[in-house]
Amino acid sequence: MTKAETGGGRSAPDLYERKATGLVRSISLRSSIYFNVTTVGVMWSVLALTQIAGGFADADPVVTAIIAVVVCLAPVLLYGLFTAAIPRSGGDYVWVGRTFRPWVGLAVNVNATTWFVLANGFLSYLVAQDALPTAFVTLGKAFNSETIAGWAGTISSPGWTFAIGVIVLVMSGILTAAVPMRKAMKVMAGFFTVTMAGLVVAILALLFTDRSDVVNGIAGAGGDYDAIISAGAASGFGAGGFSLWSCLLAIPPLYLALAYTVAGAYTGGEVRNPRKTGVLGPLTASAMVGVLVVIAFSAAARTLGSDFISAASFLSASGDPAYTLGQPASFFYFVTLGTDSPIVLTIIAVAYFAAPLSTILATVLFSTRNLFAWSFDRILPTKVSEVSPKTNTPVVAPIIVTLVSTVYLAFLVWGSPTFSAAFGAIILGTTISFIVTAIAAIVFPFRRRALYASSAVRGEFMGIPVLSIVGALALVVYGFVFYALVSQDALGVNNSTGFMATVIVLTIALIAYPLAYAANKSRGVDLALVGRELPPE
């Protein structure tokens, strides 16, 4: 082991660096952008339009999007700077654990990773419940085929939903374990291209569509444009009100996309140039998604009409009988109402189906790196950190992630609706981990002075470490998002189910280290020594 730090902070122990993990630094800047964009799913990002419009009567989705793009830069930059400072697999597990104590770092990372793994199960569920049905309905319209459109109802049955979900999860797990990261990034590049094309085509379709085409399309789908607006206005939606405060409170749905473009941070041990890629990768991804979202929202407001979007979104979400359209309100459904072009409809259908697949694959990739980091620190059995000599990728970790996601999928398909409702707390649960990470960034330059001084982000502004400044800004963003989540009913988190799910996952995260410590202590291994070591390259 190589000594990496002497002293640092108040009586902080010396840090030692362990090397040789079997992982290879193969993620370039371009790959990082693909990876981070597909993690949040650029196609899924614009779905926040209907949640904002239908949940906040006085919020302008375009204004909300612009604000979200700006405020989310701080959280994204925070993870980028930490990646450049300590480019190791595990992300916040490493940063927080080495700033404070291993217990804190593990709790933060277990909490976030649990939600990420559950997200895979939820997304695999949505493949058969939302992505594929929407794609089939769209393709049915494109090719004037009732047979294809009818497949939407067939695959929504419990058996088909579970079978399709399992296939998606297993294929993602196999791809993660059996393909070198360099090739996996090429797959991510393919998903990036397909989903990006779908969103761009949707935006162009809106820009070249007249309002009259939309009105006729809505009539053909069994609705009435003016009647929907009138019904929404009667409930306070679509009446043209505006409040900047409402725009701020409506940020979380977009924050989920824009501030989560930090997936590369968890694969820091495989980033080729941490100083450059670690920072520019997530920032570019977030800015790219943000700009497209603003353009998409603006195009929708121009063609569909803000009043219609707000009214239809509210009526659809509340189950009001005045909403008589064939599909739930969503950005892409609205786009398909205004066009009959088979090419446009086919591209949107394929891209919409590819969106959850890309997110699942990306989440499996970085979640396995977290398990890998725990295993290398002996939190989990060392078998979990086993790396294939052929592919230089973890072998056992993808199996664990796939199994847990599959179990949650089963609960979603055959269990109580509570399991689905509980997943809504993902933003609240992960934000708690992000808050602790922001605090760690603020104090890291002071607690680990020597390590910070030797890092790639050791700059200062007016005598204050840049990392501390960014950490403070990110903490403000995280704190406000947390406030919005617990105070606004429209976000669907501040209920007993959401709070209970958050508490359960946090409890698991908090007891993980004591259990691992006791198990290792019985074998004569002191996990406290982990805090005196830097994780492996």
Image (cartoon, rainbow, N blue to C red):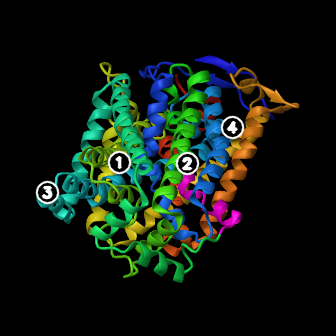
Q: Amino acid at mark 1?
A: Pro
| Residue to which mark 4 is pinned | 99
Q: Residue at x 42, y 39 (%)?
A: 38
> Could you classify mark 3 by the number of other residues whose Cα lies within 10 Å: few (under 14), some (14-19), or many (20 or more)?
some
> Could you classify mark 1 by the number of other residues whose Cα lies within 10 Å: few (under 14), some (14-19), or many (20 or more)?
many
For this orientation, the residue located farthest to the left is 147
**Would residue 377 be found to the left or right of residue 209 on screen?**
right
| Residue to which mark 1 is pinned | 356
Describe the element under mark 1 as helix, strand or loop: helix
Q: Residue at x 36, y 43 (%)?
A: 198
Describe the element under mark 4 as helix, strand or loop: helix
| Residue to which mark 3 is pinned | 145
Residue 124 position, x and y percent, is 31, 52
On whether residue 507 falls in the magenta region, the answer is no
Q: Disc 1 or 2, which lies upstream in sequence?
A: 2
Residue 65 position, x and y percent, is 59, 52
Q: Disc 4 or 2, which lies upstream in sequence?
A: 4
Q: Nearer the viewer, residue 523 or 332?
A: 332
CA–CA distance between discs 3 and 1? 25 Å
Magenta residue span = 242-255
Q: Amino acid at mark 3?
A: Ser
The answer to whether residue 136 is visible is yes
Q: Nearer the viewer, mark 4 or mark 3?
A: 3
| Residue to which mark 2 is pinned | 294
CB atoms of marks 2 and 3 within 8 Å: no
Q: Nearer the viewer, mark 1 or mark 2?
A: 2
CA–CA distance between discs 4 and 2? 37 Å
Describe the element under mark 3 as helix, strand or loop: loop
CA–CA distance between discs 4 and 3? 59 Å
